[in-house]
Image (cartoon, grey):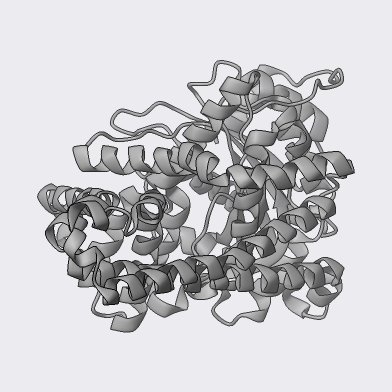
Amino acid sequence: MKSAFDTDPRVRRALAVLTGAVTWGLITAPFWASAIMPDQWVYLFVAFSLYWLYRSSSLAAHALVAYRRMLAAQRRDWLAACQSDARWRSVHHLVVFPTHREPVGLLGESLRYLADQDFPRSQVSVVLAFEERDPDALEKARQLLARFNGTFANLWVTVHPDLPGEPPGKASNLAYAVPRARKLLLQGGRQDLEQVLVTVCDADSRLPAKYLSALTHTFLADPDGRFCLYQPALLFHANLARIPLYVRVIDGLYSVIQLGRLAASYKLVTQSTYSLALSACHAIGYWDPEVVPEDSHMFFKMFFQWGEKAKVRPIYLPVLADAAEGTTWWRTLVSHYRQARRWSWGVSDVPYVLAHALTHRDIPSLARLSRAGHYTKEHLLWPTHWFLLAGGLNLIPHLAPRIALLPSTQDLALLSSTAFAASTPFLLVLIWLDQRLRARSSHHAPIWQIGLDLVAWALLPVLGLALMVLPAVEAHTRLLLGRGLGYDVTEKRVAPQPEQPALPQVSHLADQRAA
């Protein structure tokens, strides 16, 4: 079903302006609301403080549940569970690594993790999806082909060209590479494409050894599996030992949140590394090349196509990824800022989600409005919560002293303070989970470093403002002003790699590119 959003740029622009305006309205609410409507603001802020208590407890509870499920998933023999279903041999995995200017050693490490899967590698094909803009793309492809030749059923290379009117990025690269991989599978004699699962990885995505087995079992166990997407836990622990103390807290918080969101499946959307059926990709026309937040957009594209059948199924296994890192402490800070800005650019999809939620009346109202509401709320809270928490009722005595002196106002202010104080134990739960996750990711830090990490959590209000909130404010302001944000590749570092064996000829790569 087409909506006005698809056809009228004025509707798209109006919704983008509305989204950005609401963000700035919330950021500045403690100022203007205290002056214009102080009575109502007191009640509204108390309601927000109670919501924050609920949100804090909910995040901690979901994170604890997800952690227990992760421990169980890591112990389970997923391959044996697959083999109990006679169809498991018909499942084929297509793993795609869209990459641009990332170190070849990083890609090699991710491929090594993929090669260590307990699932038969004869049922795994890999696409290394490079960009033409990367002058070293063919050299990297040569090295990786030489190292992993014969490891998988297929190892293909694509080079996404710079096409007129098409912005570079992960979505456009996937839209170019995956249809070509589908064609190669057909040419190779595989006709049952209903049983092909595509896994989209970042260059630094280290899939756990049981991931493909767990994915296969989850897919086969669901009658509507071909309409679903699958999301593992993303933990930014691969390079944690090298990350400075002042940003390690942010990466730990990100990791706990990523784990906890799996248990809240009613609002779960895909992010970064995820899987879905190739038949679903083909049915909806693959990825939209112009979209930067391609992961969440892909879910909503499927949701508005198939309604409640389209769900994100959690895979409670940890995928290790690199935290943003630079060659100096300053570049590490900048890299974290840029990464958060790119993630928060998911707000650019809010107008698309809202427009389709309002027009797709073929989907039950509760389902579409709930999905759109949760997505919109998360993106609006990202840049605004810090200012709401910091501003609160603090300006009421200055801008509305008469209201501040009322007994009812003082009682409500006490209730608000109590709610925020009651949220503190739930932060301690997140800190405890952060330490447990680090230990399970083989990051065995000495006691003194653990102590410093715990002290650093006290800096979370400042670090969160600089590296989480302000990047989101910039992204939302760009949306308001109509200044787009391109796909910004996070800077990566990697340890020196050993000398590589003899390399394939360029003609071999050219043939694969032509395919």
309 or 249: nearer the eye?
249
Which residue is at 72% across, 31% downward? 106
372 or 209: nearer the eye?
372
Image: 304 above or below 160: below
Which residue is at 57% across, 74% downward? 225
Image: 32 above or below 111: below
In the displayed structure image, the side of residue 318 where residue 354 appears, left or right: left
Which residue is at 26% across, 63% downward? 354
239 or 434: nearer the eye?
434
Q: Position of residue 149 (x, y in %)?
A: 80, 35
Q: Position of residue 369 (x, y in %)?
A: 31, 75
Q: Position of residue 31 (x, y in %)?
A: 23, 50
Which residue is at 47% across, 36% downward? 466
Q: Position of residue 102 (x, y in %)?
A: 62, 27
Q: Quadrant of the image for the C terminus?
A: top right
- Where residue 11 sits, quadrant-wise, is bottom left
- Where residue 444 sits, quadrant-wise, is top right
In the displayed structure image, the side of residue 174 where residue 377 appears, left or right: left
Res 191 seen here:
no
Res 169 seen here:
yes
What number of labels is visible?
A: 0
Q: Quadrant of the image for the N terminus?
A: bottom left
